[in-house]
């Protein structure tokens, strides 16, 4: 299935039903009085986060969604039935924004999270509503209120713990297939990856993290060159970036340090917050470098990049060094997760958490 991470839809909540002006007419009821009921509420439009979905492709084919209008009020004290609601299932990580103003209305971050994206109109009042001691025979009624109508822009940002960053053919797809359950397309030509791939890495029975592989970046990506810039948004929610560098490029004229610096520059142009995320250097394809040259090759790359963070030497093809990398990633993710947990106030009398 084609990966779709943007869509524009029109949603229309149901209008409220009209109120009714009616009077009771029954034999032997001399003073029947008003009996017109209120109209029913129009249907709402909801969005719910569904963990089983991973694209917005459903909204490419059906773009307009209308909830039912409320039923009109009737005589004999009968109120209108409310209109049926609509529930739109969207992937976890979907951002819902107003297409005209760009204002972000909701973000679906938890599976099962449900939000109202268009509210149905209230029903109008029947003449029963206006009955009083001084107004015995009201003839007033009101029409139902209109439901909300909106044009919404949907944008999907995948929820991954780790994002893979690098030039085309740096070995990102090979790595994600080696350490996770993802099976992306792998070939010996650039831009093999055309859409993001997600993989779950199992470290232990109850220990795992999610890694995202996006299309490779090239110089000028922040201005629209290549494919990767379209998917950089998927790295904005990650907790760690792995900058993969091809330590043994097939073309000897290609300098991996120059390529790595170009990627870092494009990252900074695109989003400063993304640039400032923790970023580890992963030197890949070291199985293609003779053993007696590896140490010098690694030192030269690190020195010219002026890189001060963690450096990992791996071969995604042979899986050399991958297990150590996975363990270190999980330790980092677990530490970040623990640090982001909200502190709990303890009642000193009972050593129990205080209610929020």
Image: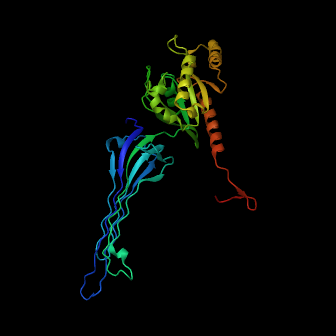
Farthest-out residue, left: 27
Q: Is residue 125 left or right of residue 316?
A: left
Q: Indicate the colouring scheme.
A: rainbow
Quick check: can you spot residue 165? no
Choose top left, top right, bottom left or bottom right for residue 313: top right
Q: Is residue 213 left or right of residue 326?
A: left
Residue 236, placed above or below residue 190: below
Q: Residue at x 57, y 32 (%)?
A: 272
Residue 2, placed above or below residue 220: below
Q: Quadrant of the C terminus?
A: bottom right
Q: Is residue 265 left or right of residue 137?
A: right
Q: Quadrant of the N terminus?
A: top left
Quick check: can you spot residue 236? yes
Where is residue 316 drawn, in percent x and y?
Answer: 54, 25
Q: Residue at x 49, y 49 (%)?
A: 111
Where is residue 88 drawn, in percent x and y?
Answer: 39, 50
Q: Residue at x 39, y 57 (%)?
A: 44
Residue 153, placed above or below residue 325: below
Q: Residue at x 51, y 46 (%)?
A: 109
């Amino acid at each position: 299935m084609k990966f779709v991470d943007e869509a524009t839809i029109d949603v229309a909540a149901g209008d409220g039903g009209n109120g009714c002006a009616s009077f009771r007419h029954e034999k032997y009821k001399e003073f029947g009085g008003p009996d017109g009921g209120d109209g029913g509420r129009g249907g709402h439009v909801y969005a719910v986060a569904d963990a089983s979905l991973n694209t917005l492709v459903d909204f490419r084919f059906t773009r307009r969604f209308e909830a039912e209008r409320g039923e009109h009020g009737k005589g004999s004290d009968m109120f209108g039935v409310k209109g049926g609601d609509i529930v739109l299932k969207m992937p976890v990580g979907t951002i819902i924004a107003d297409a005209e103003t760009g204002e972000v209305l909701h973000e679906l971050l938890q599976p099962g999270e449900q939000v109202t994206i268009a509210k149905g109109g209230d029903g109008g009042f029947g003449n029963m509503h206006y009955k009083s001691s001084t107004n015995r025979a009201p003839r007033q009624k009101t029409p139902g209120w209109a439901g909300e109508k909106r044009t919404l822009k949907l944008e999907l940002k995948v929820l991954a713990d780790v994002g893979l960053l690098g030039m085309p053919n740096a070995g990102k797809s090979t790595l994600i297939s080696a350490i996770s359950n993802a099976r992306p397309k792998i070939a010996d030509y650039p831009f093999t990856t055309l859409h993001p791939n997600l993989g779950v890495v199992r470290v232990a029975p109850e220990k795992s993290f999610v890694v995202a592989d996006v299309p490779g970046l090239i110089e000028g990506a922040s201005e629209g060159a290549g494919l990767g810039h379209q998917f950089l948004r998927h790295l904005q929610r990650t907790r760690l970036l792995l900058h993969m560098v091809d330590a043994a490029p097939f073309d000897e004229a290609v300098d991996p340090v120059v390529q790595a610096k170009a990627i870092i520059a494009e990252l900074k142009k695109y989003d400063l917050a993304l640039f400032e995320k923790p970023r580890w250097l992963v030197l890949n394809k070291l199985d293609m470098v003779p053993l007696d040259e590896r140490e010098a090759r690694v030192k030269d790359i690190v020195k010219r990049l002026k890189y001060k963070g963690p450096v990992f030497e791996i071969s995604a093809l042979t899986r050399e060094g991958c297990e150590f990398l996975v363990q270190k990633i999980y330790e980092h993710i677990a530490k970040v997760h623990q640090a982001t947990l909200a502190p709990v106030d303890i009642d000193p009398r009972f050593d129990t958490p205080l209610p929020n």
